[in-house]
Image (cartoon, rainbow, N blue to C red):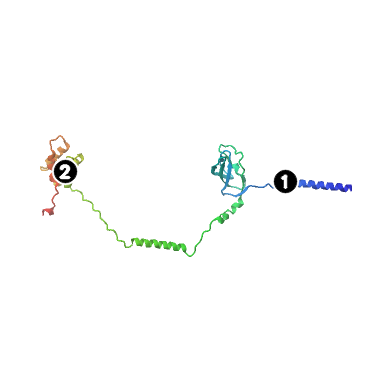
Amino acid sequence: MKQRLNFQRKTVRVIGLAGLLALAAIFVYWPEKDDSLNVPLGVEQAAIITYSGPNIAVQPYKWGVAVNIRIAKVTAQPDARIYDVRYIVNRAGTFDLKDYLIGEDGSPLDGLPSFKFHGDPKLSKHLDARIQETEEFSVEVDGYYYATLIGLGIFWVIWLLLLIFYGRAKPPQQTAVADPAPTLAEMLRALLGQLEAGTLDVPAKAKLEVLLLRRWREDLALADASMSDALEAIGRSEKIGPPLRQLQHWLHHPASNVRREEIVEIIAPYTKEPRKPEDES
């Protein structure tokens, strides 16, 4: 009886010890709960962080970094700031967003909450199919509907153009008639009027001399001769030579005794239009 009781006690102890070992193994090897978020690779994600510490900035970019981060927007609150953080996971693995953030002054961010996420290549494989599922389906209309609309539009435009322009009388073309150039006599009359009024300035005097020389060259048929030859021929003329010398003294020698009335008498005969042959007949 006593041996049986001892055996039962030993059995209970062994069973208890085995239970304790089993509980310890379960506690050690039980998988930890993974609170990280599964995100596809290469697709931008968003996270909202509320933090009351110093201003948050993104750590300097490094080549080959697993996560690319940018701060899209910062909203200031009375006791904290709200950061709209965007991130893209480049390769598979589990990452924490706070590992890629730092204070603007380079100081560590104490008390910044952890935000873990897991880059899942499996999600990326079916990403195109998921995007297509969310796209709106277009409505397809058969029966040459759009072709008919285009044809009717072209016909309407052609009909409108014919209605506006076909058979429309063309406006009469007005030929611009240029005013005839003033004759030599008309220009001399204008200069004579200025001379009589005492308003003949230096440019007008130079023009008067040129016009009189032109007229005298025509009278002596010297239109093709050089100016030096023409002046020499005019000076030798008994009829035109004296008026030429009077005009030059009056124009180029203000102290000369040639009077303005004498110049008027020289110009006056040339202010009349020459008679045409048909007028004389």
| Residue in the image at 71% along x and 46% along y | 29
Query: In what element is the residue under mark 2?
Result: helix
Q: Which residue is mark 2?
A: 193
Circle 1 packing at 10 Å, graded few (<14), some (14-19), many (20+), is: few
Looking at the image, the residue that sits furthest to the right is: 1
Q: Is residue 122 above or below residue 167?
A: above
Circle 2 packing at 10 Å, graded few (<14), some (14-19), many (20+), is: few
Disc number placed over residue 71 in the picture, else none: none
Q: Position of residue 56 (x, y in %)?
A: 56, 40
Q: Nearer the viewer, residue 141 or 129?
A: 141
Q: Position of residue 174 (x, y in %)?
A: 26, 56
- Gap in angstroms between the C-alphas marked 1 and 2: 128 Å
Q: How many marks?
A: 2
Label 2 near label 1: C-beta < 8 Å? no
- Tell me if residue 252 can be seen: yes
| Residue in the image at 16% along x and 43% along y | 193
Three-letter amino acid code at the position of disc 1: Phe
- Tell me if residue 214 can be seen: no
- Picture quarter with the C terminus: bottom left
Three-letter amino acid code at the position of disc 2: Gly
Looking at the image, the residue that sits furthest to the front is: 78
Q: Position of residue 58 (x, y in %)?
A: 56, 41
Looking at the image, the residue that sits furthest to the bottom is: 143
Q: Which residue is mark 1?
A: 27
Q: Position of residue 42 (x, y in %)?
A: 57, 49
Query: In what element is the residue under mark 1?
Result: helix
